[in-house]
Image (cartoon, grey):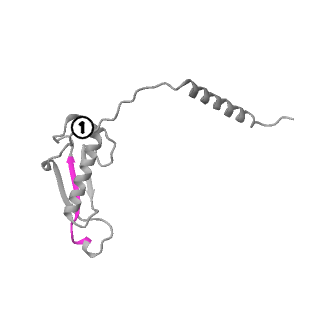
C-alpha cells in the first residue's frame, strides 16, 4: 500500500455539540459530541482522490461536497474528536486505493452446456404443469 494521505487540521472544522439520547442529567449540560465538517473541493487532497470522494454515494457527503461526521460515542470531547478524525481518514483511505481492473473472461464450454441443460430441464418441468385434457 502507498503512503497514507494526511488531512491538515486547518481544513477541518470541528464544533462541540450536545449529544443525543439517554445519558442522565449530565447530557443536558455538557457539549461532548463532535460535528466535523470537511470541504472536499477546498481541500489540499490530490485531484484524483477528490473526484473519487465526490462520486462516492456516501450519505455523509452533502451535495455541496462537504463531509459531515457526527461522533458521540465517548463521554469525553477529546475521544469524540479523535473518533471523528479516524472516520474521516477511513473514508479518505477507502477511495485512495484503486480497485483492480477486471479482466474480461469467457465462460467455459462445459459451464455453458451445463447452464443450457438446466434451462432445458426446467422448461420441461414447467411445460408439464398445464391443464390436463381428457
Q: Residue at x 22, y 62 (%)?
A: 79
**Residue 30 in magenta stretch:** yes
Q: Residue at x 30, y 65 (%)?
A: 20
Residue 26 lies in what quarter of the image? bottom left
Q: Which residue is mark 1?
A: 49
Pick out the residue farthest to the left.
10
Q: Is residue 130 visible?
A: yes
In what quadrant of the picture does the C terminus appear? top right
Q: Is residue 30 shown above or below 39?
A: below
Q: Is 40 in front, or is 105?
A: 105
Viewed as shown, does residue 112 lie left or right of 93? right
Viewed as shown, does residue 111 lie left or right of 97? right
Q: Residue at x 27, y 62 (%)?
A: 72
Q: Is 7 in front, or is 22?
A: 7
Q: Label 1, secondary structure: give it.
A: helix
Count of residue discs: 1
**Residue 5 in magenta stretch:** no
At which x and y percent is residue 89? 24, 48
Q: Residues within 10 Å of mark 1 (few under 14, many from 20)?
A: some
Viewed as shown, does residue 125 lie left or right of 30? right
Point out the stretch of residues depicted in magenta: 27-38
Amino acid at each position: 500500500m502507498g503512503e497514507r494521505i494526511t488531512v491538515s487540521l486547518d481544513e477541518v472544522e470541528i464544533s462541540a455539540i450536545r449529544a443525543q439520547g439517554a445519558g442522565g442529567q449530565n447530557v443536558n449540560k455538557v457539549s461532548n459530541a463532535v460535528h466535523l465538517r470537511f470541504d472536499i473541493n477546498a481541500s489540499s487532497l490530490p485531484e484524483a482522490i477528490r473526484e473519487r470522494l465526490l462520486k462516492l454515494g456516501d450519505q455523509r457527503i452533502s451535495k455541496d461536497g462537504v463531509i459531515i461526521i457526527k461522533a458521540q460515542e465517548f463521554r469525553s470531547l477529546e475521544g469524540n474528536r479523535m473518533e471523528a478524525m479516524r472516520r474521516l481518514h477511513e473514508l479518505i483511505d477507502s477511495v485512495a486505493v484503486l480497485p483492480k481492473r477486471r479482466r474480461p473472461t469467457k465462460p467455459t464450454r462445459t459451464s455453458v452446456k451445463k447452464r443450457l441443460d438446466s434451462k432445458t430441464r426446467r422448461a420441461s418441468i414447467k411445460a408439464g404443469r398445464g391443464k390436463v385434457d381428457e
